[in-house]
Image (cartoon, grey):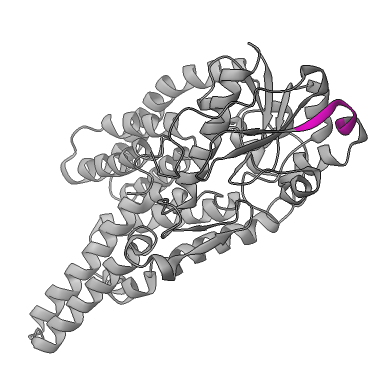
Amino acid sequence: MAAWATGGLETTLYPILVFASPYAYLRFLRTGKDSVAVPVLFVLATLTRPDALLLFGVTLAHFTLFQLRTDRKLWLRTVLIWLIVFAALFAPYYLWRFAYYGYPLPNTFYAKLGGGNLKYFRGLAYITEYLKIYGVFVFIPALMLLFRRKRTVWIDYFALLIAAYFCYLIYVGGDGLAFFRFVVYISPLIYVLVQEGFANLYYGAKRLHTLNAVSRTAIALSIIAAFTFTMRQTVFPILFQSREQWYDPQSQLYFPGGNSHSYLWFDNYFVDRLAIAAEWIENNARPGALVAATPAGSIAYNMKNHKVIDMLGLNDEHIAHTKNDRIGAGRAGHEKGDGKYVLQRSPDYILMGNVAVFPFPLDEKTMREKLRLKSEHELWADPEFHQKYELRCVRLADQGLFQYFSFFQKKELGQPTQAINSRENTGNSR
């Protein structure tokens, strides 16, 4: 949650709505008030991310199991009101979106999903990795206490929502970004259960008159262990840089940087790397130039006067809908591409090597070694690409991590400006 709070995506709004919607539902079960708040909040969540529709469906199923046997009329009236309110708010938006885009789901769903069963194994590995890194096995003894015979309704409901969402994550094959972004969405529900589990452990020991110094110490150590695991990905790289370091062969840099640079995480460095490439193109390319990049995120975000072809397909209809029967064998969201299609679009600049802004220049041989993902490899294998494009390398700075920008441009564009970037380029994160 902390890592994604400044990510610029929906990863702060969505967890708030995913927590607020079940909270409104449980408040309605407890008090019978504000029934309409339930579908309204679920609509807002679904407008933020369409997978919230699954959680609304789980809520309807839970309400059916909870209420159908005791008061059939109340159940029917409430469900009808919720469905009518949800449809009245969501249907106009959905019909407009479908008419505009022509597809029932957002483009990113098509870019990330495909045929084959490999994505299920990747999704299962994604969940397993989260459980391992965040030390969920530490929570299990406390969580098991929640599933006693006499328990409150909300515990079953939260557990049902979490289980359904984890099944969904397995189905879509997890996520390709760091810090378990998809788990963040459901994490408030997870950790409320964890909190309740530790509270039950404490009060259970107190009721049994076993809350002596040993049991107090054991409970305290369990809670400390739980907190320690939740900090592993964000705090440990700050405190134990040498132990947490890993090597990126593309840039030939270590992260955290230690004495060589100030970046703790690769992701911050990578966003800055793309921003610097975008800045050079913005200042040097002719107005309206077309740029192809893998990826497009920070490139497109930092350019105002040029269009970008996203060679991963997240923002490209054609690439997103190409077929790939081995979805799940690679990184989620990074498996589709179409080099021939990119070449047909005739971009002025093609940024290869995962946007090659490095402390060293690249020639044809070293650029080939830096190629990443499907579109880049297909472009390189196409003779027409080498006939129409040439490798350029511009000097951006005299020192630092971003000294050279290597890219391909149309031969007809001529020699690029060899200007040194005027802004400070020392590898300090912005």
- 219 w.r.t. 118: above or below: below
Q: Residue at x 46, y 35 (%)?
A: 49
**Residue 313 location, x and y as percent?**
67, 34
Q: Please tell me which residue lies in front, 360 or 40.
A: 360
Q: Residue at x 43, y 28 (%)?
A: 47
Residue 157 visible (yes or no):
no
**Residue 81 location, x and y as percent?**
34, 28
Looking at the image, residue 312 sits to the left or right of residue 211; the answer is right
Total marks drawn? 0
Question: Which residue appears farthest toward the front when viewing the image?
Answer: 398
**Residue 141 location, x and y as percent?**
30, 77
Give, as a single range, the part of the protein colored magenta. 385-391
Question: Which residue appears farthest toward the top when viewing the image?
Answer: 287
Picture quadrant of residue 402: top right
**Residue 361 location, x and y as percent?**
67, 43
- 101 w.r.t. 361: above or below: above
Figure quadrant of the C terminus: top left
* Residue 249 inside the magenta-drawn segment: no
* Residue 390 inside the magenta-drawn segment: yes
Q: Please tell me which residue lies in front, 87 or 13.
A: 13
Residue 406 visible (yes or no):
yes
Looking at the image, residue 387 sits to the left or right of residue 227; the answer is right
Q: Residue at x 74, y 53 (%)?
A: 116
Q: Residue at x 39, y 60 (%)?
A: 233
